[in-house]
Amino acid sequence: MISAEQGERWVSSHRDQVPQIQGALKAIAETLWAQRTMLSPDLASGLAGAALFLGYLSRRPGFEGAKPQAEALLELAIEGIARAPRPSLYAGFVGLAWCIEHLNGRVLDAQAEDPNADVDEILLDILQVDGWDAEYDLISGLVGIGVYALERCPRPTGMAILDRILHHLERLAIPRGPGLAWPTPPERLPPWQRRLSPQGYLNMGLAHGAPAVLLLLAAMQRVGLDPGRTSPLLAGGMAWFMDQIQTPDGPGYLAGWCPMEEARVSQGPGRIAWCYGDLGASVAMLQTARLAGEAAWEEVALDIARRAAVRPVAEAGVMDVGLCHGSAGNLHVFHRLYRMTGEPIFQDAAGRYLQHVLASRVPGSGFAGFTAYRPPFDEDGATLECGQPHVPAPGLLEGAAGVGLALLATLDPADPSWDRFLLLSTPLPVLPKA
């Protein structure tokens, strides 16, 4: 739970920016609705993500009309979900199911029948294999399915899905250095990363790597899965992850990934972001520590987060405003850290990124005034001929819908629990130190 006092203090400190924020929210909502037929059904870039934004927006006075729009977008997504058949949280049917589960009875009217009973059975069937040969991560793999399952707990099917995920995480873990790690084989890497890591790599980012696994394991432990299975994995994974934390004389404590050929890498990434590097990993580690009751882990997490908080925005590698690796994502993660800790250093950092988001908006251009950066090279690392690297983007992860949710959270003293899909919070209470 968050401190209501901290939430109120945050909202009060940004009252002067409310008109700008309200204008951006209105433009995002109107543009998403106007272009709804152009959107894919998924959570990260399509209709499900747009519905999440509009659903939460409908709770704000003056935006009540967004509620039936959110319901209509979910219906469109359900009709088109055959276009997103993968068991992926961000790009497949799991993300739509998570969105329906999360909004049902919380933001939208509760449905009389369980809307996801069939999804649970499909996932249990998919997970019944003995050997998992797909991704393990948050974006596309097992951890993302686990985020959905946590939303379903304490239903028996939610617990059963978590148990099957634990089975696969046990078998995918390998001994590494002082603990355990989860490798990504080379065939799952784009060509440019495969050249750097020909035997695959160990990922340290929240989006694709160990921080998400560790947080899910701590959550599994808290909901009552066998501690004889969860505890060794969590302790071993954290031992390896802590060994990868570097001295703070470089640009960051954590690298994005470590090639299998190396014991550890010597340089962390310069970028401050949710997906890779210190910021996203630190808030996941802080939650893991509090769920597991490990004060030493918490202190390390806060040290990493505090150093990220004092980095100037101009030195953070921010190229756009999206949740994934842009200023809205940094705004929301620092905002979340402030709500979790009450430390002014995080409030100040969030305020700087809020200014960046608002200053980046150009009404009448992009998507509701916002654009997303597209790197000018392909998966082979070849330079692309492109006239404009910043493009309109409606989506939740990299586009305007996600920016809207981050801005909306700045106006609301209540807990912004929509960020569970980012693993910036969970359905389980994360309590401060005693």
Image (cartoon, rainbow, N blue to C red):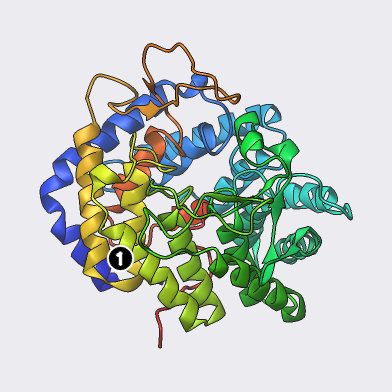
Quarter of the view holding residue 264: bottom right
Give the x, y percent position of residue 10: 21, 61
Q: In the visual, does 416 lie left or right of 81? A: left
Q: Residue at x 34, y 41 (%)?
A: 317
Q: In the visual, does 336 lie left or right of 9? A: right
Q: Give the vertical position of 307 relative to 67 (above or below).
A: below
The residue that disc 1 covers is 338
Quarter of the view holding residue 347: bottom left
Farthest residue in the right direction?
130
**Is any part of residue 411 visible from this angle?**
no
In the image, 168 versus 47, the foreground residue is 168
Farthest residue in the left direction?
16
If the image is split into quadrants, where does the N terminus sit?
A: bottom left
Q: Residue at x 46, y 63 (%)?
A: 246
**Is any part of residue 387 visible from this angle?**
yes
Q: What residue type is disc 1 on? A: Tyr
Q: Secondary structure at mark 1?
A: helix
Q: In the visual, does 410 lie left or right of 156? A: left
If the image is split into quadrants, where does the C terminus sit?
A: bottom left
Give the x, y percent position of residue 226: 75, 78
Q: Give the vertical position of 305 relative to 383 (above or below).
A: below
